[in-house]
Image: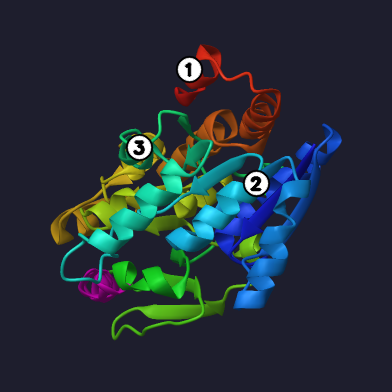
Amino acid sequence: MKVLFLVQGIDVAASRYRVLQYLPYLKEHGVLPTVLPFPKGFFKKIRLFHSIGKYDILFIQRKRFTFPWLQYIRKTAKHIVYDFDDSVMYRNSMAKSPESKSRTRKFKNMINSSDFVIAGNEFLMRKTIPYRKDVITIPSPIDMNLYSQKNYSEKKETVTLGWIGAHGSIHYLEKMRPIFETLGAKHHNVRLKIVCDIFFDCDNMVVEKKLWSEQDEVKDIQSFDIGLMPLVDDPWSHGKCGLKILQCLAAGVPVICSPFGINREIVEDGVQGLWANTQEEWIEKLEILINDKDLRERMGREGRKKVSRDYSVAKHAPRMLNIFRRLVNDSFHEPLKKEAAY
């Protein structure tokens, strides 16, 4: 079985977590994968799309093509799988309004032109169902072989609040600056670590700025004592698939998060971490974990168990393979649909 994966870029997080980490398993089970970034330029697109017919499946990660290109692809491809892990039908949280007719139209066209859709969470699946019933949810899973548990026995004088992510999402964290200023004035042993490519400073709290690198990613997360996942309650945020949370929990780091979208599904309040919405709640919940090392460890261990059980590559790679096999064999039926309740 030959599968062509079209991705945003080899170094993009969505490509790594929703495509690349599946490849070893897929290869072991008879899939011959080809991974290419989306072509730029008219003639490069023509050359690539003309070759699509030699593959059994075209897997498109997140990209919505304009309708003329989509028609050309549809005529050439044998089977199309569309995978997405963001609210691509809405504008992001920085926009004045989330609604967008053009985004909705491109999303609808992409879904209608696909044979099967993989949504990153339940919210995204619900947005897909009006246009395509052949859809299941597969989260952005974690390879537990890469994420070892943090060393809780290490004696540290400081408590590190940690955030990892792309520069497009750091505005969620920057809105918490008043919270960090308040905590920093009261707790001189607390610092903030930001793993990104852009940063900000605080007056009352030390900020450690670490450029993201794939080589250091797990080690950086293990250095956190408390992971942070702030969001706002809007359609764009509801499309988030909780990768930051899953990475922290996989390493045994408890998380404090906004109780919106998939955050509520991954983190049970008081089990793997805590929920916080208002500024007062964030300060209260952060102080609980800052002052209780044993509680941090218990929650971190519970979080690692949950990721291993429900959000691991070992669990979801067979589901991906099952989709490909059923598409190629034209054998979709009810048992596949039931997999949505993972």
- Give the magenta range: 174-186
Q: Mark 3 points at which residue?
A: 131
Q: Nearer the viewer, residue 156 or 61?
A: 61
The label on residue 77 is 2
Q: In which quarter of the image is residue 79?
A: top right
Which is more N-terminal, label 2 or label 1? 2
Which is more N-terminal, label 3 or label 2? 2
Res. 293 in view: no
How far across and how far down the image is residue 219, in percent? Answer: 65, 62
Res. 174 in view: yes
Q: Which residue is drawn at 48% across and 44% down?
A: 113
Q: In this view, does 237 lie to the left or right of 5?
A: left
Q: Is residue 36 left or right of residue 334?
A: right
Amino acid of disc 2: Ala
How far across and how far down the image is residue 269, in percent? Answer: 30, 37
Q: In this view, does 321 lie above or below 284?
A: above
Asked which secondary structure carries label 3, the reply is loop
Amino acid of disc 3: Tyr
Q: Mark 1 points at which residue?
A: 338
